Amino acid sequence: MSLLIVGSVALDSIETSGGSVEEALGGSALYFSWAASFLNPVKVVGVVGDDYPMDALDNLSKRGVDMSGIERLPGESFRWAGRYSPDFNHRETLDTRLGVFADFNPKVPESYRDSKYVFLGNIQPELQLNVLDQVQDPDLVVCDTMNFWIDGNRDALLEVLGRTDVLMVNDSEAIQLSGHSNVYRAANWILQQGPRTAVIKQGAFGAFLVDDNRIFYVPALPIEEVVDPTGAGDSFAGGFMAHVARTNDLSHETLRQAMVYGAIMGGFAVEQFSVGRFGEIGLEDVKDRVVRFADLMRFEIDD
Amino acid sequence: MSLLIVGSVALDSIETSGGSVEEALGGSALYFSWAASFLNPVKVVGVVGDDYPMDALDNLSKRGVDMSGIERLPGESFRWAGRYSPDFNHRETLDTRLGVFADFNPKVPESYRDSKYVFLGNIQPELQLNVLDQVQDPDLVVCDTMNFWIDGNRDALLEVLGRTDVLMVNDSEAIQLSGHSNVYRAANWILQQGPRTAVIKQGAFGAFLVDDNRIFYVPALPIEEVVDPTGAGDSFAGGFMAHVARTNDLSHETLRQAMVYGAIMGGFAVEQFSVGRFGEIGLEDVKDRVVRFADLMRFEIDD
């Protein structure tokens, strides 16, 4: 089924103890689309400047990602530069230049408006509302956000939550948003604001899903050599939503499966700089990891 | 089968944002024994001063915990005082008085020496070696340690590892011991030092087990109201080893089950101050949590 993502398209410059990249493809919409494209077609809404290397997006087009909703405006593309600590537990932002993204005003093309699965990437809550006003009758709205909006645009964010089915955030964001220091209390608080499901990501530890009295926990696949954690969360979202969209099923059991696909895509994302790893793998690699996740989590106790 | 624990018996004074206790039962041997006692008898080697409230241990005796190996010496018992941050992510030691524990010289009673399952609690590595010299022919030796010994008694600790089947430590300890900042690399390093299995605990995120090319991950059971995290790791060890001892089976499948029992006991431990929660529950509560863990980790993907 049709899957829409609204988010950032950026150029990332990243330093780690193991290497660096300059102006590599980045942004939530790109990570999401790459990850999702293994399972389901994707329609993207975003904005870039007239300096964006559009040729570099050809690979995505070939994979069924519709980028006709990426607006190209005069000016600079969104650029972000950051550096990770050797253990990847800390990230320092070295530079943020919003460029044309500063005035991002998402326009959902006519051909996208009947999308049944909608992912609202981490953008200003007012813009997320604006997107929801433009889509006709989605079956599932999943929303991401960040500390900046939780602090500064709380009312609009709560309005978004009232129109959201699944809030998908990091544990620290859930804690900040809810005011509960316990992450499970935070998740239950979220369920009282509108979403029927909360997905809480915990970085290298995995993620859990909470809906009506049920919890599912998926660990992260053990990775001995993390290269670049950027985009892991958006890749998680891409795997999650693409599985739900392709099955066109919103049952709790399908959401459990979607969590596993999310964890798989988040894992691939960190194995190379930028979206590099996605260019190296195929559906068979994804299926191999399903088997590895099953083995990672399997136990039997009869008594 | 016979299960031996050598560890500390202490009196803990603990402050959290939710309350406090003074001189409550504590120490690795007590948490371990309480947790294990639901599944298998336990024999304890430890030391207390002549001020220790021995009556308070009657409950444990009644549960099949043999405390004839707890030496009672003139002097003060081991006392520890600490305070947790409101989110329980940080712990500050307010006071440590080793008392008679400073000169702990574990003596394994004759009746304990044929124990088949041996847990070396977090004590000086030289004493752990001393214990191993006193037991006859154990089927499984599991060892804990801490930053203090990793720093100061590294050679002796490596000698212990050479005689250990399972090293069970926190992720930060595995990282410190191995010099690898990636926790999975750290685990594989541990496997090269002697142990055939590494169990890495990750606090509220759960724990994983690594042996020859296989990894099993168990999350922590979601707990909305943590009261006191003290002793969670030792309770985990108690659940883990008691399950292995009662099944008397060292297969990988049994170790997976043992991880789940470990996580269950670690979860109970944090729900009250000291060992309080263990006094409130029975085997049925343990079995209920097995079912909850199965549901927490369950997914099915066919394609």
Image (cartoon, coloured by chain):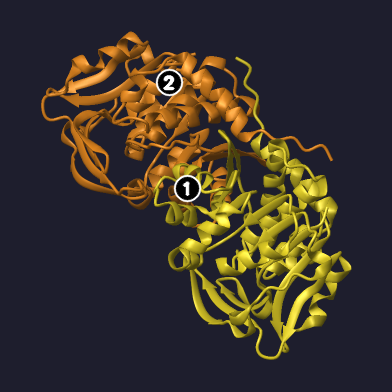
Chain colours: A yellow, B orange
Residue drawn at 88 percent across, 69 percent down: A62
Q: Is residue A87 visible?
A: no
User: Would you identify the image quadrant in which residue A30 lies?
Assistant: bottom right
- Label 1 vs 2, first from the N-terminus: 2
Residue drawn at 29 percent across, 13 percent down: B59
Q: Residues within 10 Å of mark 2 (few under 14, many from 20)?
A: many
* Badge 1 and badge 2 in a common chain: yes
Q: Give the x, y percent position of residue B71.
A: 22, 21
Left or right: A202, with B154 as reference point: right
| In the foreground, B109 or A15 | A15
| In the foreground, A125 or A14 | A125
Q: Is residue A105 visible?
A: yes
Tag 1 subunit = B
Q: Give the x, y percent position of residue B237.
A: 44, 30
Q: Which residue is mark 2?
A: B36
Left or right: B207, with B27 as reference point: right
Q: Give the x, y percent position of residue B176.
A: 43, 53
Q: Is residue A247 above or below residue B287?
A: below
Tag 2 subunit = B
Q: Give the x, y percent position of residue B148.
A: 32, 48
- Residue type (three-letter) at the residue carrying disc 2: Ala
Q: Residues within 10 Å of mark 1 (few under 14, many from 20)?
A: many
Q: Which residue is mark 1?
A: B171
Q: Are marks 1 and 2 in contact (CB under 8 Å)?
A: no
Q: Is residue A105 above or below residue A195?
A: below
Left or right: B89, with A16 as reference point: left
Q: Is residue B298 above or below residue A22?
A: above
